[in-house]
Image (cartoon, rainbow, N blue to C red):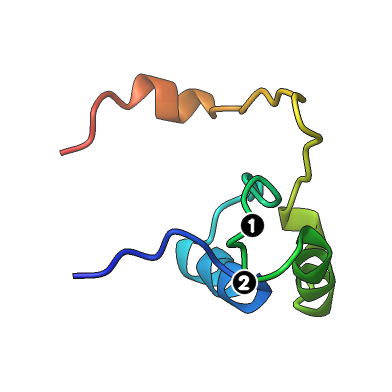
């Protein structure tokens, strides 16, 4: 069994398309030397894929407050 723990720009775009989140936030993009490509490669791929409005970039140490729709809060646990 293998588990993908790092992605290059192309794989990141594919992940966004598969998961289809409202918003994607790349993390751990320059924390280790084993990464396949820098964040700049991903940013270019996001723009080329027309996904700029779906990706939010945070600076190290910056926080983000996720918005959860009220309907999700009142729906209860999923089975």
In the visual, does 66 lie left or right of 41? left
Q: Quadrant of residue 5?
A: bottom left
Residue 46's place in the image compared with 72, above or below, is below
In the visual, does 5 lie left or right of 42? left
Farthest residue toward the front? 33
Residue 16, percent from left and from top: 57, 64
Secondary structure, mark 2, is: loop
Q: Which residue is mark 1?
A: 33
Residue 14's place in the image compared with 69, above or below, is below
Q: Nearer the viewer, residue 61 or 51?
A: 61
Rendered-image quadrant of the N terminus = bottom left
In the visual, does 79 lie left or right of 54? left
Nearer the observer: mark 2 or 1; the answer is 1
Q: Nearer the viewer, residue 73 or 33?
A: 33
Q: Quadrant of residue 53?
A: bottom right
Rendered-image quadrant of the C terminus = top left
Q: Nearer the viewer, residue 4 or 75?
A: 4
Residue 63, percent from left and from top: 71, 23
Q: Identify the residue shown where x is 76% and y is 32%.
A: 60
Numbered circle sitting on residue 8: 2
Q: Identify the residue shown where x is 62% and y is 71%.
A: 8
Residue 19, percent from left and from top: 47, 61
Q: Identify the residue shown where x is 54% and y is 29%.
A: 69
Q: Residues within 10 Å of mark 2 (few under 14, many from 20)?
A: some
Alpha carbons under labels 2 and 1: distance apart: 13 Å
């Amino acid at each position: 069994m293998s588990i993908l723990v790092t992605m290059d720009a192309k794989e990141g775009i594919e992940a966004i398309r598969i998961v289809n989140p409202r918003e994607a936030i790349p993390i751990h993009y320059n924390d280790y030397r084993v990464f396949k490509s820098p964040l700049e490669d991903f940013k270019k791929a996001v723009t080329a894929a027309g996904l700029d409005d779906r990706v939010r970039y945070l600076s190290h140490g910056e926080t983000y407050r996720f918005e959860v729709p009220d309907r999700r809060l009142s729906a209860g646990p999923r089975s």
